[in-house]
Amino acid sequence: MKVLYLQNDKITELRKQANRLPLSPGVYIMKNKEGEIIYVGKAKALKNRVTSYFRSGNNHTEKVRQMVSNVDRFEHIICDSEFEALVLECSLIKQNQPKYNILLKDDKGYHYINITGEKWPKIRIANKVENNGKYIGPYYSSYVVKDTVDWVNKIYKLPDCTRSFDKPTKPCLNFHIGKCFAPCNGKISLDNYTETINSAVDFIKNGDGNKIVSDLKLQMQNASDRLDFEYAAKLRDRINAITKLSDKQKVVMCTYKEQDVFASAFLGETACVSVLNFKNGRMTDKNHYFVEGISAKENLYDEFLREYYVSKTDIPPRILIDSNFEDMELITHWLKEKRQKKVEIIIPKSGEQLDIIKMCLNNASDNLSLKTTSSGKEMSALNELSSLLGLQNVPKLIESYDISHTAGEESVAGMVVFKDGLPLKKNYRRFKIKSFSGNDDYRSMAEIMERRISEYNKGDDEAFGVLPDLLLLDGGLGQINAVLPVLEKYQINIPVFGMVKDTKHKTRAISSSGGDISIKSTRSAFVLVNKIQEEVHRYAISYHRNLRSKKMFDSILTKIDGVGEKKAKALMLHFKTIDNIKNASLEELMVVDGISKVYAERIYDYFKENNC
């Protein structure tokens, strides 16, 4: 406890110091007990920004909470403008590499394409130059090297195995599926093989598909003239492969010759930023970066773009980005100063450029999915849903509720939970409506929310122990208005939306206090919300049907003289269904606890006499 008091005393002291700061632009420098710089930030108003770290009950991310807990003191430098503060901040971060700033680690190194020195050479990826054949490079991007080697091997159907081809052997699966022309089968001469490798190396060095296709067509004609039709067919296949490659490259080409593209996907406080680089109208590189401790795009890009470009000299004239952020104008000005030419940061709304952003976002979602149990599909849907609903954070945990009854009888509710876009069935819960009887979905929804929060406050049930990031109610504005007062009563701030169905009982829109939001145009979000709505409806109605069936079964059995609720329950537990009881023999009925021969005969006779 003493440690906790000391920490609170330190926070109080730091807050007092921060309150004495001026309302001027500047840079603040956080240091730990050893005097190490652990965070550098810039502010439009130093007092407001720095005090925000030390206010009690502030809604910080876990990363910021850890940083604050390690702050022993801070320093500040007053600047004439926010732009001057930005430049100074970038310089200090570059010099000191503080632990809690976003630091993009560049561990790519150099990469090479290796043409091995064997008698039958192969084309490989290499990270360093060794005494093994010839090397093309260095390349800065591993993506460029891998993509080039993959495509060259596909186009020329080159072997990627470790076999020696001096003695004929049986070809492997790659030959049978058309991925390798199988020099191992002894039908390819070393001269033809060497010619193929040389052609592949020319393709790597020149990259001019049109010229290579022209040369190959000439070779194909010559092979045909000398009646070497098998080799001519291989050349024809190579021409087709290069043509397909050219078509593929058009997909990653754009109108603007030089630009960088940024898009990010979030899950909780983890973000993945995907970066695509275009030069001469072609995508020349792609990378992704994971960032911890940031849960909103407007907070991410402020820091990320500064760190990404702080050491770069090749800043493009255009930067595409998928979301607005607070310092966009300031960062644009800073990049313009660094480049000494015009720089634009653009959020595309339609056309080719929006398609590129979507491709970049898909890359971010796919890479983020590798760190979670979700697939890239779920990640895309969650990010799309977050953007559609205007949520501050991507919802990692979603709870959904539906009410089910028959004319007010056996009224129940179902709660389903989705984590990272997937059902978390162990956390599903069912409720019977207790506070009233009759048909009132709004009142039922309010009761369920009251009980759910009550369970959260108790902390006894794992499923109720964590509040969700998003509430989705089966219904519209009425259900939302029933739940909001309950949340306000307990001072709980969770986004609440309704799921509105069309005449075919499919999700049509998401309802909010501001009106309906159509989701059919956003395919991934639509699929996810529809899946959630169908699941919560299935879960609620199955519980209601079970209760209704049990009540019906119990009522049939209790009509039999001497059979009360206890005996009816014992019979249902043993036989499971009324049909099984109806078809049971006297001996089988007498096996059930409490069912003597007298009662067995009454039950047996009842079903025979009533023919039911």
Image (spheres, rainbow, N blue to C red):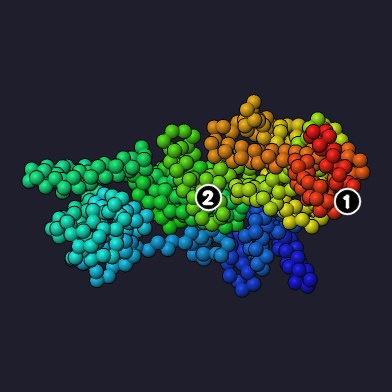
Q: How many marks?
A: 2
**For mark 2, what is the residue?**
375
In the foreground, 404 or 401: 404
Identify the residue at image location x=79%, y=57%: 460
The reply to whether callout 2 and callout 1 are in contact (CB within 8 Å) is no
Q: Out of 310 and 187, give the one closest to the viewer.
A: 187
User: Taking 190 as reference, is 327 left or right?
Assistant: right
Q: Secondary structure at mark 2?
A: loop
Q: Quadrant of the N terminus?
A: bottom right
Residue in the picture at 68% in, 57% down: 53
Q: Residue furthest left?
A: 226
Say which residue label 1 marks: 596
328 on left or right of 582: left
- Residue 420 rendering spot, x and y as whole percentages: 60, 50
Position of residue 263 measured from the top left corner of the image (x, y, whole percent): 49, 46
Amino acid type indicated by mark 2 = Ser
